Amino acid sequence: MKPSAIPVKNILLTFSPFLVLCILLLRYAVDVPASDEWTLLPFLQKAYENHLTLFDFWSQQSEHRFFFPRLIMVPLALISGWNTRGEMFVSVILGIGIFTILALQIRKTLREKRGQLWWSVLPAISCAVFGLNQSENWFWGWQMSVFLSVFSAIAGFYFLADPDFSWKKYFAGFVCGVIATYSYSTGVSFWPSALLILILLRRNKLTWMLWVLGAIGIAATYLYHYEKPSGHPSVLFGAIHPLQYSGYVFSILAAPLVAFTRKLSSVISFATTIQQFIPVVFGIASCLLAWALIRVVIRKGVLTIASASPYLGMMAYSLFSALLIAIGRGGFGISSALVLRYVTASSLFWIAILFLLFLLRAEERARKWPSWCIVIILSLLMMNSVYGALYAIKQSGLLAESRKELVVGKDDSLLARMYYTSVLHQYIHLLKKYHLSVYRNSSPVRGDRL
């Protein structure tokens, strides 16, 4: 396609979600640690006292081992005086990386197709990648671990699904898997998903065997000295309550589009009962749609199994991630499956569906149902992003008030919005001692936002 033929409208639509995200971050992001982010402070104390070890980076936090995120966050905090804007900036960079790899993968798939189709798909992919339906991750610097894990997984799929196999790409994919696993717990989902890609591409059995052995080794190191987080449901919850477990899994898959239903009961008085079923039904329908799309595009020769493998890997990654999250959190109820921080991993499922729908629409223009599916999915995605934006703005105001109180330290009800007050009272003197966060300058920083 000639440069002059590139549709300007599609270019603007592609960059719009990113620009909206950046504008809202600049306006509403609050520079203060929140919730589990406070657990980084002991690491900073050890760093200042020269006692920080690699074992500390590897140590367990809830269900996760944040080895690689800590390697980024600790130096970043030491350099910036623990300005959490730096972590949010890294999240945005990783988001750009995720979008870039997805765009390259789609372009590779459409190598023999029209370039017009590529530009038609990109705005939809941008909405999913930079969507504010995952605002909890964008506005919470600590959650850069999620983006690092997903970025590594996507990069690994890109290397492994390359038609021109080489051991260098195989090893690069393995390294990406290690980074994904040791960035966020759902990164473990990369290993079976990548194995599926290797099988679909009919790689030789040696690659399968080495992959399985490597995955077992990584899992063994992950589970070494692993302890079940206190206060979490039993890991046997799925076996004891299979229906609730399945409902939780389907709800996580549906969360990128229908997380806003979590708040229906506060708007519609009779919605308390039905709001539990909407995400479950929608999740089941999405799986049926994905299955139908895969069958149609392969049966009609729109894609070969090999060319479809990276998108099947993405779907598998989201599904395995949902299964893993449900093991540890399923007992908390369907409502907790719709929290916005779970959206990032599940978004890969919908990105793959959207691409297949665009592809099918281009191949069979006489059929209207792919177009209607695209319209419905993007409409729900944007509705959910509006919900996410409103949620972020509300949380910004609450956190800004708590940030001011961190300097005063008298109103525990405001401090409790950030973390356990008993812990914060102990940590404030460390902030003062090392000039971190609101105390990074000679006098406390009193600005509300960025």
Image (cartoon, grey):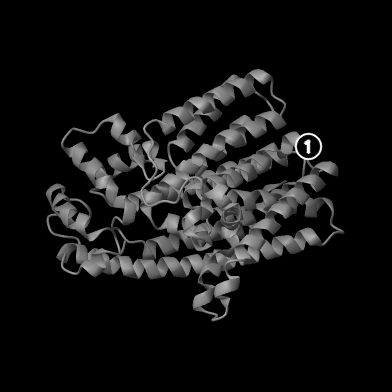
Quickly name the residue at label 1: 304
Indicate the quadrant where residue 248 lies. Answer: bottom right
Q: Secondary structure at mark 1?
A: loop
Q: Position of residue 87 (x, y in %)?
A: 36, 49
Q: Is residue 373 above or below residue 235?
A: below
Q: Who's the residue at 57% across and 76% down the image?
A: 271
Whether residue 26 is visible, yes or no, is: yes
Task: Assess disc 1: are there few (<14), some (14-19) or many (≥20) residues with their C-alpha within 10 Å of its C-alpha.
Answer: some
Q: Position of residue 44 (x, y in %)?
A: 23, 42
Q: Who's the residue at 73% across and 34% down the image?
A: 306
Indicate the quadrant where residue 70 lies. Answer: top left
Q: Position of residue 228 (x, y in %)?
A: 40, 43
**248 or 192, which lies in front?**
248
422 to the left or right of 348: left
Looking at this view, name the residue that lies furthest to the bottom: 269
Looking at this view, name the residue that lies furthest to the top: 206
Mark 1 residue type: Thr
Q: Who's the residue at 46% across and 42% down the image?
A: 185
Q: Quadrant of the C terminus?
A: bottom left
**236 or 405, which lies in front?**
236
Number of dots carrying numbers: 1
Looking at this view, name the residue that lies furthest to the right: 366
